[in-house]
């Protein structure tokens, strides 16, 4: 199948009609019908049948779509990469961030950077730690910002700042709390669990074991901001990174660092053979300054 055939098949399958596919592809309906008919004839397969005036995908089409979808995404990514390479006039930054930095830190940095450099465009995606290398290798991002990212022989790491874990709680859950919360205070309490697979979650679990503290996970989740939202809704206290804690808007929710503190590094990673562009270097510096600004002592 040629790319045009893949493109047409993908459009018809996802939209469910020739007319909608034509609008998506900005071509005429006869053009879509011709390519689809040729594709079915060439493959010797019936991909769609007409049922009560609607196109219905066949089992063969469902099986083909599984493969075509991945190819289509890669080809679309290739087209975007070519476009980005041509965009030498202003620059384009493909940024990957862990989800909690996507709440406030990354948007604030991008907005400020765009005011300084309006010609620079961004493509932003959230990544979990186990997705970092693949995203960099496949060029879906140029740089990624993460907490204690995993080591890899092809990845370069640059420390931007540090952060620490915070206990997030509603005012009615802890009374007369001080400037920091002893980890022992969590023993036996009902909490929203920090079951992330990343190194920050691992550090918290290790410290619980070291101190012999046992918490009761009433809700398990894998994302810091979901844990924060659950706490805000009254599901129980939780432990999150400080950037998630500081991004919260619930007036009834408070946060305090743990005692002893559990810290982590905020790092920028990129492939060794693909160093950041000049625009990306400037953005990294701005992002680091914003993290330092956000980490100013909270009230």
Image (cartoon, rainbow, N blue to C red):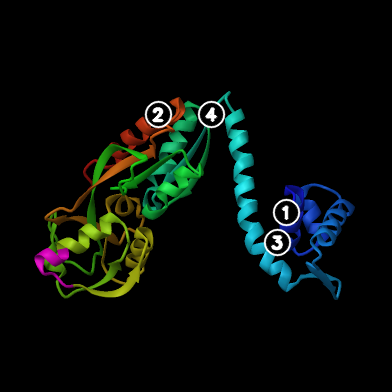
Q: CA distance from mark 4 to mark 2?
A: 12 Å
In percent of width and height, residue 59 lies at 72, 73
Residue 9 shows up from this direction: yes
Tell me which corner region of the image, top left, top right, bottom left or bottom right, holds residue 41: bottom right
Q: Any mark on residue 6, and which? A: 1
Q: Is residue 209 magenta?
A: yes
Q: CA distance from mark 3 to mark 1?
A: 12 Å
Q: Which residue is mark 2?
A: 281
Q: Which residue is mark 4?
A: 91
Q: Where does the magenta region start and end?
A: 208-214
Crowding around mark 2 (Cα neighbors within 10 Å: few <14, some 14 to 19, many 20+) is few
The secondary element bearing badge 2 is classed as helix
In this rendering, would 156 be left or right of 11?
left
Asked if marks 3 and 4 touch (Cβ < 8 Å), the reply is no
Crowding around mark 4 (Cα neighbors within 10 Å: few <14, some 14 to 19, many 20+) is some
Q: Any mark on residue 14, and which? A: 3
Q: Looking at the image, which residue is at 34% across and 46% down?
A: 146
Q: Give the mark, 1 or 2, whose residue is nearer the N terminus.
A: 1
In this rendering, would 170 be left or right of 56?
left
């Amino acid at each position: 199948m040629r790319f045009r055939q893949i493109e047409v098949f993908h459009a018809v399958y996802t939209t469910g009609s020739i007319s909608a596919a034509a609008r998506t592809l900005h071509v005429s309906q006869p053009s879509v019908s011709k390519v689809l008919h040729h594709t079915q004839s060439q493959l010797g397969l019936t991909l769609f049948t007409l049922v009560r005036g609607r196109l219905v995908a066949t089992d063969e089409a469902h099986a083909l779509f599984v493969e075509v979808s991945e190819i289509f995404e890669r080809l679309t990514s290739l087209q975007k990469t070519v476009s980005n390479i041509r965009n030498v006039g202003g620059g384009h930054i493909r940024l990957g961030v862990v989800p909690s930095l996507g709440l406030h830190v990354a948007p604030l940095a991008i907005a400020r950077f765009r005011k300084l450099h309006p010609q620079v465009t961004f493509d932003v995606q959230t990544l979990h730690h186990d997705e970092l290398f693949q995203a960099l290798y496949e060029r879906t991002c140029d740089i990624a910002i993460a907490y204690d990212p995993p080591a890899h022989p092809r990845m370069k790491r640059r420390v931007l700042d540090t952060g620490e874990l915070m206990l997030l709680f509603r005012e009615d859950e802890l009374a007369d709390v001080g400037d920091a919360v002893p980890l022992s205070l969590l023993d036996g309490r009902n909490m929203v669990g920090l079951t992330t697979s990343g190194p920050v979650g691992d550090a918290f679990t290790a410290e619980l074991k070291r101190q012999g503290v046992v918490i009761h996970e009433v809700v398990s989740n894998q994302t810091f901001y979901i844990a924060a939202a659950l706490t805000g809704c009254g599901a129980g206290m939780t432990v999150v990174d400080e950037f998630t804690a500081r991004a919260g808007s619930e007036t009834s929710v408070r946060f305090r660092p743990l005692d002893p503190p559990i810290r982590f590094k905020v790092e920028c990673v990129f492939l060794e053979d693909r160093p950041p562009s000049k625009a990306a270097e400037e953005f990294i510096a701005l992002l680091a300054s914003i993290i330092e600004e956000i980490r100013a002592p909270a009230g």
